[in-house]
Image (spheres, rainbow, N blue to C red):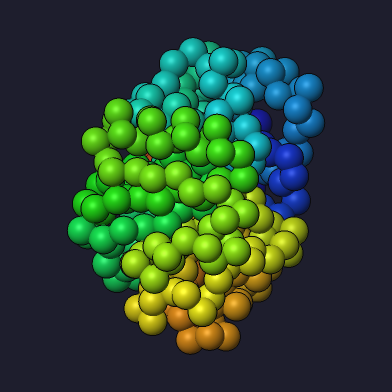
């Protein structure tokens, strides 16, 4: 029941209509009978600063941050903590008495997803599509998993190189950058050497296909998509059609969302409640 004691939680992004966070976050809040409600807010770029500042005015307890604001939101916060400092990207903001603190639970979400699905990347080479905030979270998780090297494929080479420099400096990782056109055309021989391909771009969110050179991939490769949408993303659908083990961003969403929930409320939500709310057990297998 919503009362005068109910506090607001939410997610900001643009677009945000696809977000499943309100579904499972509210399910967990209801299950634990906590005095919060969780909503989605589509914030246009010029209004980002005002939206974040509104957390102070309205005593909003917490916000998740999604595409395209995970890096852009930082100047409006009072401080970053833990993984957010390392990644220089934020997906969770907590209001502590008017002080806005930035966290990042994406890396933990992907790490736990890889663990849960049994994706073996220790000592292996992984190909990463993208170079934004989600890609930084992926690099963090891969470094924690002990990968041997990361191949970064990004549409803007300069941004890919920036991510590579960051990964080398933070984790002493062996990193190589490959141009998007060359990589997706299958010109690189490295496709056959990777244990996993992780899509950390926004491609697939609106149904876009990613032109991977499927015939060059190893038979034991994993396809991991941080993007999610109703049903399966085109990337995961194509992988499953070819018999390649894969999963989309709903798995990562559940784990990063559980961490955000704890930061907001101090309570650990049962994963079963989150899964049942999304009804994704079949989708994420």
Q: Nearer the viewer, residue 123 or 99?
A: 123
Question: Residue 175 occupies which quadrant of the picture?
Answer: top left
Residue at 75 percent of width and 33 percent of height:
43
Question: Residue 51 occupies which quadrant of the picture?
Answer: top right
Residue at 49 percent of width and 13 percent of height:
78
Q: Where is residue 42 drawn, in percent x and y?
A: 76, 39
Q: Where is residue 249 drawn, in percent x and y?
A: 53, 60
Q: Is residue 1 visible?
A: yes
Q: Is residue 165 above or below residue 22?
A: above
Q: Is residue 121 above or below residue 154?
A: below
Q: Nearer the viewer, residue 252 or 28?
A: 252
The mark total stands at 0
Q: Where is residue 198 drawn, in percent x and y?
A: 46, 58
Q: Nearer the viewer, residue 167 or 282?
A: 167
Q: Is residue 22 visible?
A: no
Q: Is residue 234 above or below residue 108?
A: below
Q: Where is residue 185 drawn, in percent x and y?
A: 60, 64
Residue at 45 percent of width and 44 percent of height:
177
Residue at 25 percent of width and 47 percent of height:
144
Q: Quadrant of the C terminus?
A: bottom left
């Amino acid at each position: 029941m919503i009362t005068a004691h109910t506090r607001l939680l939410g997610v900001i992004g643009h677009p945000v209509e696809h977000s499943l966070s309100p579904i499972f976050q509210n399910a967990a809040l209801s299950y634990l009978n906590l005095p919060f409600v969780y909503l989605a807010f589509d914030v246009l770029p010029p209004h980002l600063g005002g939206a974040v500042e509104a957390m102070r005015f309205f005593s909003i307890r917490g916000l998740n941050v999604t595409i395209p604001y995970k890096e852009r939101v930082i100047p409006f916060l009072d401080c970053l903590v833990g993984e957010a400092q390392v990644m220089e990207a934020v997906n969770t903001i907590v209001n502590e008495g008017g002080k806005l603190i930035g966290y990042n639970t994406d890396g933990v979400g992907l790490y736990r997803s890889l663990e849960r699905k049994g994706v073996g990347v220790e000592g292996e080479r992984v190909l990463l599509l993208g170079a934004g905030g989600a890609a930084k979270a992926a690099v963090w998780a891969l470094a924690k998993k002990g990968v041997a090297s990361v191949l970064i494929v990004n549409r803007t080479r300069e941004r890919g190189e920036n991510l590579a420099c960051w990964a080398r400096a933070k984790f002493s990782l062996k990193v190589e950058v490959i141009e998007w056109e060359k990589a997706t055309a299958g010109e690189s021989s490295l496709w056959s050497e990777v244990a996993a391909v992780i899509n950390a771009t926004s491609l697939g969110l609106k149904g876009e296909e990613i032109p991977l050179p499927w015939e060059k991939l190893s038979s034991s490769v994993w396809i991991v998509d941080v993007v999610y949408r109703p049903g399966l993303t085109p990337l995961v659908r194509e992988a499953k059609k070819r018999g390649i083990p894969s999963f989309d961003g709903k798995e990562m969403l559940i784990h990063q969302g559980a961490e955000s929930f704890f930061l907001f409320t101090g309570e650990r939500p049962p994963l079963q409640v989150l899964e049942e709310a999304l009804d994704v057990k079949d989708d994420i297998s």
